[in-house]
Amino acid sequence: MVIKMQNQKGLSFNHMGIYVHDMAAMEAFYTGVLGFTVTDRGSLQGAAGPVQLVFLSRDPRAHHQIVLASGRPASLAFNPINQISLTADSLDTLRELYLRFVELGARDIDAITHGNAVSFYVRDPEGNRLELFVDTPWYVSQPMKVPVDLELPESQLLAEVERHARSLPGFCTRAEWEARMRELMQA
């Protein structure tokens, strides 16, 4: 069933919760590597017993942006989390984080562009895929994924991303795409 809202008032994405197996390892990763702060912790009674909770934020206005909850089974047939995406405040920050993961010996680092963003994907200690990204000023039809070298000088990296994006279907400026989305969401 699809329900189309008549307008977009009153609702925006705020935070997410992740069931974890090893609370200490996950807390250490999100605080030590990604710079989240523990804002609260505690326990609640769940249907299957007590659930330990750790609340994490990088924004002093938000009590939590991620909550870690105990109870993830040690093994799952597959990970139901496709990705957790975090926006970097600049390409410099994105590259600093990328190099940090490289220095930490992270496996499976995938630096790419979607045309509308420059990203890298990496896994947290329990295998959840993270996407760390910055938006570009362009839009192209999705899905689209092309490898990039995050160690290139910023001007060269952005020139290559733009050159490729301009060759793809749907290319336009982000402002043009946002205007179309505003119209669509208000329809």
Image: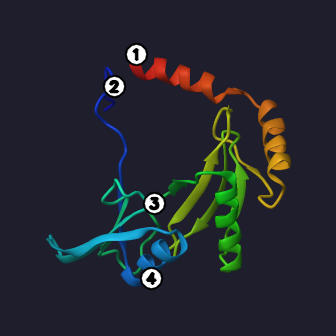
Which mark identifies residue 4?
Answer: 2
Q: Where 65 sits versus 47, above or below? A: above
Q: Secondary structure at mark 2?
A: loop
Q: Looking at the image, is 81 positioned above or below residue 35?
A: above
Which comes sooner in the sequence, label 4 or label 1? 4
The residue singled out by tag 1 in the image is 187
Residue drawn at x 33%, y 55% is: 62
Q: Position of residue 183 (x, y in %)?
A: 47, 17
Which of the pair 35/162 is nearer the observer? 35
Nearer to us: label 4 or label 2: 4
Q: Do labels 3 and 2 touch, CB within 8 Å?
A: no
The residue singled out by tag 4 in the image is: 25
**What amino acid type is highlighted by mark number 4?**
Ala
Q: Amino acid at mark 2?
A: Lys
Residue 112 on image: x %, y %: 72, 53
User: Image point 65% across, 72% down: which residue?
Assistant: 101
Q: Secondary structure at mark 1?
A: loop
**Where is mark 3, residue-wise?**
81
State left or right for residue 135 relative to residue 161.
left
Which is more N-terminal, label 2 or label 1?
A: 2
Of marks 1 and 2, the one in the foreground = 1
